[in-house]
Amino acid sequence: KAGVTQTPRYLIKTRGQQVTLSCSPISGHRSVSWYQQTPGQGLQFLFEYFSETQRNKGNFPGRFSGRQFSNSRSEMNVSTLELGDSALYLCASSLTGFQPQHFGDGTRLSIL
Amino acid sequence: TQLLEQSPQFLSIQEGENLTVYCNSSSVFSSLQWYRQEPGEGPVLLVTVVTGGEVKKLKRLTFQFGDARKDSSLHITAAQPGDTGLYLCAIDNYGQNFVFGPGTRLSVLP
């Protein structure tokens, strides 16, 4: 069974640009959650999508957004990038969102 | 939002030693998961504990859920270099999302 796939694995951007990250969940999983991981703040919840609807949202500014498609694949977008957005962005999927998460290996975003 | 604390923050030990890491919550939780994250990879689920006082074993790893459902511990017997990684605990935040602790970074030296 294929795991959670995140693309790209690495990304380098400059301040002010925008970026889109992609996540393909495990087949059959309908819940996709996004997390930001930094050395100082740890793993922080961004948002969760279920059946193409944002169901829960963490405490991040509106520059961070996402969406989910009918096949459960999800994208997150960060606009007007700031240096502090440099982080590992992790996607996790589960059947309905109330089970332990299955994580992808993340996208490491570096802002210059 | 429930808060999680983990201790110690860092731990460096020699191969063959035993160790225990802890996870504590500011309030009662219904279930708790332990994950291990290796460099360059995402966290991988090790175990879920649900019942107060529950003990689960996974080879050399022993997980315990506190009777009051506010804390948990992970004990590793005869640690090996392959146990090196970031150990994270996580709880269900009232059905809204999962809250993760800051993690314990374990280094097992050969």
Image: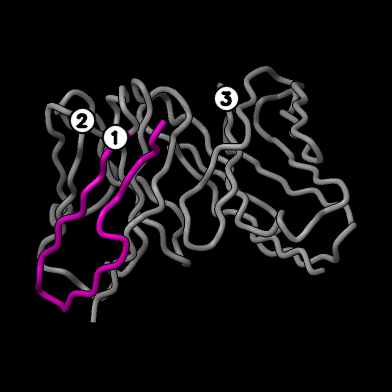
Please identify the quarter of the rendering in which residue A92 is found: top left
Query: Are circles 1 and 2 on residues that touch, CB within 8 Å?
Result: yes
Left or right side of B83 for A31: left
What's the distance in space between the residues labelled 1 and 3, CA to CA? 20 Å
- From the top left corner, tell me how far across and down residue A74 is, in percent: 20, 40
Q: Amino acid at mark 2?
A: Ser
Q: Where does label 1 land, which residue?
A: A32
What's the distance in space between the residues labelled 1 and 2, CA to CA? 8 Å
Please tell me how crowded label 1 is: few (under 14), some (14-19), or many (20+) other residues with Cα within 10 Å. Answer: many
Q: Amino acid at mark 3?
A: Ser
Q: Nearer the viewer, residue A34 or B6?
A: A34
Check residue B73 in the rendering and tell me which mark sits there, or answer none.
none
Q: Chain of mark 3?
A: B
Left or right side of B70 for A61: left
Name the image quarter holding the N terminus of chain A. Answer: top left
Query: Are circles 2 and 3 on residues that touch, CB within 8 Å?
Result: no
Q: Is residue A2 magenta?
A: yes
Please tell me how crowded label 3 is: few (under 14), some (14-19), or many (20+) other residues with Cα within 10 Å. Answer: some
Q: Nearer the viewer, residue A26 or A14?
A: A26
Which residue is drawn at the image coordinates 25% and 59% (left, top)?
A8
User: Is B4 situated above or below A27?
Assistant: below
Q: Where does label 2 land, which residue?
A: A72
Q: Where does label 3 land, which residue?
A: B31
